[in-house]
Image (cartoon, helix red, strand yellow):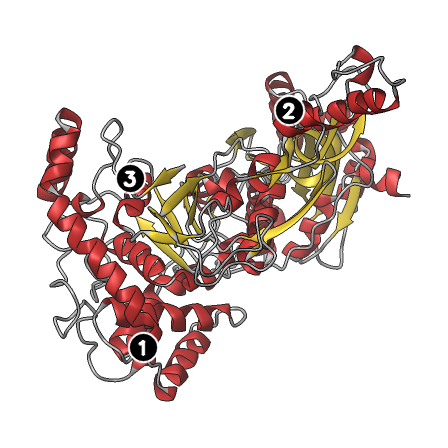
Amino acid sequence: MRDGSTDPANPTFPFSAVVGSDDLALALVLTAVSPEVGGVLVRGEKGTAKSTMVRGLAAVLPSLGMVPGCRFGCDPADPDASCPDGPHDRDAAADTRPARLVELPIGATEDRVVGSLDLERALGRGETAYQPGLLAAAHRGILYVDEVNLLHDHLVDLLLDAAAMGRSTVERDGVSVSHAARIVLVGTMNPEEGELRPQLLDRFGLTVEVAAPREPALRAEVVRRRMAFDADAAGFTRRWEAEQDALRERIGDARQRVRDVVLPDAVLARIAEVCAGFEVDGLRADIVTARAAVAHAAWSGRTVVTRDDVRAAARLALPHRRRRNPFDAPGLDEDLLDQLLGDDEPEDPGPRDDGGPGNGDGPGNGDGPPEAQPERSPAGPGEPSEPSEPSEPGDPEDAEGRPGGSGSAPARSASVPDLAPRARLLTARGLGHGAAGRRSAAVTTTGRRVRETTAPTGPLHLPATVRAAAADLTNAAPGTATRLHVRPSHLRRAVLQGRESNLVLLCVDASGSMAARRRLEAVTSAVLSLLLDAYQRRDKVGLVTFRDTGAELVLPPTGSVDVAAARLRDLPFGGRTPLAEGLLAARETLRVERLRDPSRRPLLVVVTDGRATAGPDAVARATRVARQLHHEGVDAVVVDCESGRMRLGLAARLATDLGAEHLPVGEVAAQTILDAARTTPTQRRSAA
């Protein structure tokens, strides 16, 4: 836990000294001015000072008053009526403490987050008492989650509930407690390591994309300041004290002013027009934009919200709420934003010297973080490019190059269509025992504790063990036992329930017949959607393609959605159909992954029309390999992409040989493939 005081033994890099993160500085400041904005999500590549800036924020936040002795940090002016340490005397002298930034580690357990049984009092005095957790410590402060996209689902749910309700309710270990938990959630993440659940993404009020500066002079200044800090942290911090003090004073003044800022009806209507124009889901975007605009006006020294404030707020509040298609980069079309705000050229939305503190210079330039700039970012996070319309191939049979035909046709690349599937999660019934993930319910090493057991293995359930030992002490004859003794018979193990992930291996027919008519668009849409879904649920995904005379592992099992999308866009189609080679490549990939990660259940999705035309005895070889996969117990789904009136039914035969579910699709919708892939044959048999 970090607070706003400066620790000489462990100084924090000054917030004002960070270079080149203007939007991030503004977003953090607006959240500090008005916590009701709802927190900040910081997305960006590694090494871009995300954590440095968030940790430095605590040092420039004004101190808070608190009720003396309250473990939950109640505000003396408005104490929580149901505080476990209450009731509080409003007339008592208030204490003052620095603002807190509480860090939530990725490996934190549920009891560390929400609190649990106070073992010292339970063991020493036999009392059932509550020990507050990190949510209580972060009340009226900032809860910082580094790598928030890697946080386990059940902890994410706890944070969502606390952020939405402003309270934390604990019912566990014989403890029943409810306390205030008004937190500002700040998370950082590297998108290459996984995406966020949409529910959590929408809870963050503002989002910022950060990247390393490209200008050599700016990069050199970053290195210069970092080296100076590492060489003499205390001296470097002292040199920035004036800027830090000025920024702290400005934030404090803005917090006082924000209560008096007026949001005119005309400006509120303009906010609604902007949100509607960008087609954001729900109304949270309107609310957050309005709150952020009010905070920006207070930060800029104004008491009335202007168009400039709305523009600055929309740039931070809307990008992550309008991601509708797979692999769309978050961003905002600022030309469209200007059109929605009005025909006039936007004024500079930076802070004005009209009565507010400071002169609006950014960190490292004298007076705190800079404001959002009206120019578009050179990186251009914005709209996805329009997909090209696939050209109409010739006769599929000729392109396929059947025996007696004209041979293989030139390869052509797949285009990625514009697709926005509304996926529905299908899970296995009962509990599995696979690797922790986001798909099916399972008994895992991390998750929510659902019960206790006397089994000899598993994580120790300490509170249950103490209760079992205490029960013997309570039931003992008077005078025979005075101290708590834990014996082997008292040991209790925790059963943790979470979700498991799978290895989804796509085996895609990229031959000439698959490029016919609209099959190419259907196949690429389906594969793209399945990749996105598996990635969001923390599955591993891989892609094997086969065409012409061989097969290729295009994408080794991975979690990188960007790499997967890039490989799919460059996927060539054309030539004969080496079905056996494709199945062999898939089998070998599964064998290697089984050695690397034996606990992860594989799912093979074969997307094909079932033809096998490459090489001698092509059909017999494909049948033999398919039966081997079936004998090895590989769960599979065959997506039949054959269309037209003259259907041969070859994919159905392949499904029989694989022991797989056969899904005839014709012109397939991505949703159909998603639903089929999420329920394996084993799951369907158990459900039946």
Q: Mark 3 is on which residue type?
A: Thr
Q: Mark 2 is on which residue type?
A: Leu
Per the image, label 3 sits on a secondary structure element best described as: helix
Q: Nearer the viewer, mark 2 or mark 3?
A: 3
Q: Nearer the viewer, mark 1 or mark 3?
A: 1
Question: Does the residue at mark 1 contact the one at mark 2 (Cβ under 8 Å)?
Answer: no
Q: Mark 1 is on which residue type?
A: Val
- Tell me the crowding category of disc 1: few under 14, some 14 to 19, or many 20 or more residues within 10 angstroms, Cα based: many
- Tell me the crowding category of disc 3: few under 14, some 14 to 19, or many 20 or more residues within 10 angstroms, Cα based: some
Q: To which residue does mark 1 refer?
A: 261
Which residue is outermost to the bottom? 266
* Residue closest to the eye, 280 or 17: 17
Q: To which residue does mark 3 refer?
A: 52
Per the image, label 2 sits on a secondary structure element best described as: helix
Q: Position of residue 620 (x, y in %)?
A: 76, 27
Q: Is residue 515 visible?
A: no
Which residue occupies 77% across, 16% down? 482
* Residue closest to the eye, 409 or 470: 470
Q: Position of residue 641 (x, y in %)?
A: 68, 50
> Which corner quadrant of the image does residue 303 belong to?
bottom left
Per the image, label 1 sits on a secondary structure element best described as: loop
Q: Is residue 153 above or below residue 542?
A: below
Give how far apart the Cα atoms at labels 1 and 2 are.
61 Å
Q: Nearer the viewer, mark 1 or mark 2?
A: 1
Which residue occupies 62% across, 30% down? 582
Q: To which residue does mark 2 refer?
A: 590
> Which corner quadrant of the image does residue 289 belong to?
bottom left
